[in-house]
Amino acid sequence: MEVIKDTGKSESRNLRFDPAKDPYIKFYDLESGILDFAKVGRSYGIPDMYKGVDHERVYLVEELLSKLESSAAIVYHKIKKIHESGKHNFSITRKERNTLRKFIFVMRYRSHNFWSKYTGTIDTYERSDRDALIEFLEGKSITNLRQVWLRNLEVIVKTEIDEDREWLQTIGREMFGDDADMYVFHMSESYMAFCEPQSPEDEFILTDNVFGIFEGPVVYDTANLKTTGADGSPPRVGDPRYTEFHKLAPLSPRLILVLRSNYLRDEPIWERRKKISSQFHARPNAVSFLQDLPIKPPKIHYWLPGKSEPVHTLEDKLFFEIYKVNTEQIHIINGLMLQESVRSITWVSDESLVRSLHAFLQNPDFTIGMSLAVLPEFASFIALQLQKHRLLSLWDKPYPTEGKRPLEELNKMNEDMRENKDLQPYYKLGRLALATNLPH
């Protein structure tokens, strides 16, 4: 994470350090509800991430991850130096572009959502790809689900992206199919762009899962519930379908990397492909919230021009422009960050944060219907929304602030509702009136 310095008014905060000298950030813990300063080096790791897996393999993967991170850092600092000099154009090689892409996916794959998928055993695994996973386990003689996640991670990091596309064969052969498809899609079905706030008063919010956030429709299949609640247990919806129009990766409060889906391109070839693939989208006619983001693919200088068409090489130069983003678009991007943040939120400018928080809380696209709010599996979402709303009353208070845990309160309230005889028919029937316009 970028080392940032406090630029807000700090006289009333009873600071315990000098923000001009010490590498601290403003850190809002969404679990405890405490707002405080934290060291930039604070760990965002997952406790016991590698518990129960082969330690020799863990060491190998961590060594590979360290090398990838170092390579990505070199590219990042190259871009950062140019950006901070006031320039709005830069070039990197195709290999450097691939390194950034891979690093973003790896960071996402190491997030709690992916890691937690491979906890437990195959007997307790309930996702829609269960049959395919069983076949993979048998084919690779794997008995521990966490080994699947670790194996996938190792294959991704150690497999070089070559222009002969041999890497696709390795990925398809060595990784679990669904995750392999997701990685290939990430590396090939979008183009990279960079943006900065148009106004010097705006900034991007940073969150714990900053490399795993996308913009696009999310749809739950309400006609085929995982459990109906007819047996007295809480009703549960199945895995959602989603479409990733944009993937967002803030590199600093003033610079963001965007991966825009190729299906949002204007060229005829992509229009044809979009029509063919629209049947697989979560909502075929959905419009992207960031459709008007003023970005374009980079221009390419080919190392080997070729006779009939250019030959792709890792030495090709990609020329990027850093595009200006207006305040309304900043609020949408920050709203997505706030919507998806689950552990922490950090920022520099208090004023920018407050404006984005207000825009987020007032935007109906970042809400869910009340019929979802009473379901136990959505209690954590509601609690997080309450924590984010509470931040508006804390940002100008002395640090550290008092904490609050709304999830515990919601669970208690939900239990009281379940025990209420007047509400028991609802839980038994499991009738859900889900909103059709779920948040992006």
Image: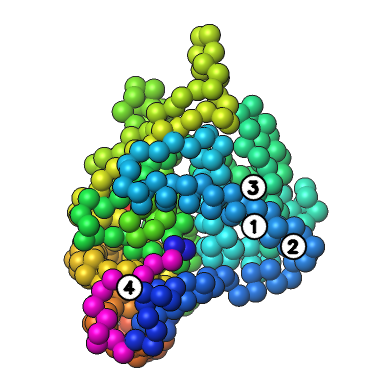
Label 2: few (<14), some (14–19) or many (≥20) C-alpha neighbours in 10 Å: few
Residue lying at the far top of the rendered structure: 307
Q: Residue at x 60, y 54 (%)?
A: 70
Give residue 175's position: percent from left, percent from top. Answer: 68, 46
Main secondary structure along the magenta-highlighted residues:
loop
* Residue at (54, 40) in percent of width and height: 96
**Quarter assignment of residue 350:** bottom left
Sequence order check: which comes first, mark 2 or mark 4?
4
- The amino acid type of the residue labelled 2 equals Tyr
Q: Report which residue position mark 4 lands on.
A: 6
The residue where tag 3 is placed is 156
The magenta segment is: 3-14
Q: Marks 4 and 3, Cα distance to the nearest angstrom? A: 37 Å
Q: Nearer the viewer, residue 133 or 181?
A: 181
Question: Which of the labelled discs sits on residue 132, or is there none?
Answer: none
Between marks 2 and 4 in the image, the one whose residue lies nearer the viewer: 4
Residue 415 image point, x, y percent: 41, 86
Of mark 3 and mark 1, the one earlier in the sequence is: 1
**Residue at the disc numbered 1:** 66
Q: Residue at x 36, y 70 (%)?
A: 5
Name the amino acid, label 3.
Answer: Ile
